[in-house]
Image: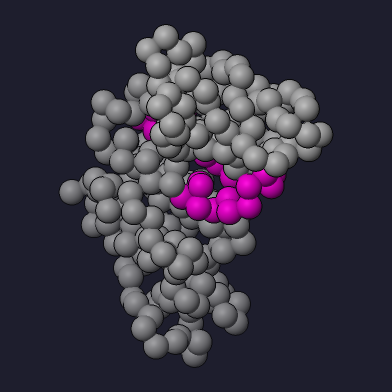
Amino acid sequence: MGLYRDEGVVLRTQKLGEADRIITLLTRGHGRIRAVARGVRRTKSKFGARVEPFAHVDVQFFVKGSDFPGRGLPAITQVETLAAHGGSLVSDYPAYTAGTAILETAERLTDHEGEPALQQYLLLIGALRTLSVRSHDPGLVLDAFLLRSLAVAGYAPSFADCARCGLPGPHRFFSVPGGGVVCGDCRPAGSVVPSPETLDLLGALLTGDWAGADASESRHRREGSGLVAAYLQWHLERGIRSLRLVERSS
């Protein structure tokens, strides 16, 4: 038996019994972890409010056995708040829905429980911090997170050179199954022809060119969001439910 500490972001909570919750976190050192928080649904709970979605916390876990997370679910014994992003997001519907989609995606892209996922964790922390301070449009923050998370997972789309033969771009066609933009010779059936400005926007979001992304027009943002959602769904093999609730720029 042992105690372990790590920092993480609360992705989701589930009721357990009459007073407990199962807390799903993406942690810095141990990837995605599910743990039991005993008694957090009672009004006298010491840390119930600290283990709500969006919370960035420092957590102490108690586990049976010598390996973490070990057999069964570890128990959360202490929680310290590092950043309470939920308070600033719930009052802003676009930011809240974008944040919810970010949490769901982070959970889906870390399938193996207990496996380190430091890059995904750092992307998540950065996205929530950016949403909280309102430094960029929430839809842009969401799409940037989705693209970069897919890249970390090994599914980076190409927005310049042909994704199939590597021919230098720019190219007109975009293929979700093909991995991004494709040249005329490699174009598969079902390819679409987005505007060049949309492809420039997506490339800016993937590389972190916020000056270029912030200067984009709403119509290109909407078109880009559709491509990102389709690309994400293709690689996850099913959609992110909370994306349907995201409020996009008009």
Please say whether residue 54 is one of the residues in the magenta stretch: no
Among all residues in the image, which is located at the extreme left?
250
In this rendering, the answer to whether 72 lies above or below 109 is: above
Magenta extent: 105-134
Based on the displayed image, in which of its 4 quarters is residue 16 positioned?
A: top left
In this rendering, the answer to whether 219 lies above or below 185 is: above
Q: Residue at x 33, y 45 (%)?
A: 139
Q: Residue at x 43, y 31 (%)?
A: 17
Q: Residue at x 46, y 27 (%)?
A: 20
In this rendering, the answer to whether 167 lies above or below 34 is: below
Q: Nearer the viewer, residue 171 or 36?
A: 36
- Horizontal and vertical percent for residue 73? 62, 37
Among all residues in the image, which is located at the extreme front?
18
- Horizontal and vertical percent for residue 135? 38, 31
- Can residue 249 be seen in this snapshot? yes
Based on the displayed image, in which of its 4 quarters is residue 90 positioned?
A: top left
- Can residue 122 be seen in this snapshot? no
Please say whether residue 133 is one of the residues in the magenta stretch: yes
Q: Nearer the viewer, residue 106 or 248?
A: 106
> Dividing the image into 4 quarters, which one contains the N terminus?
top right
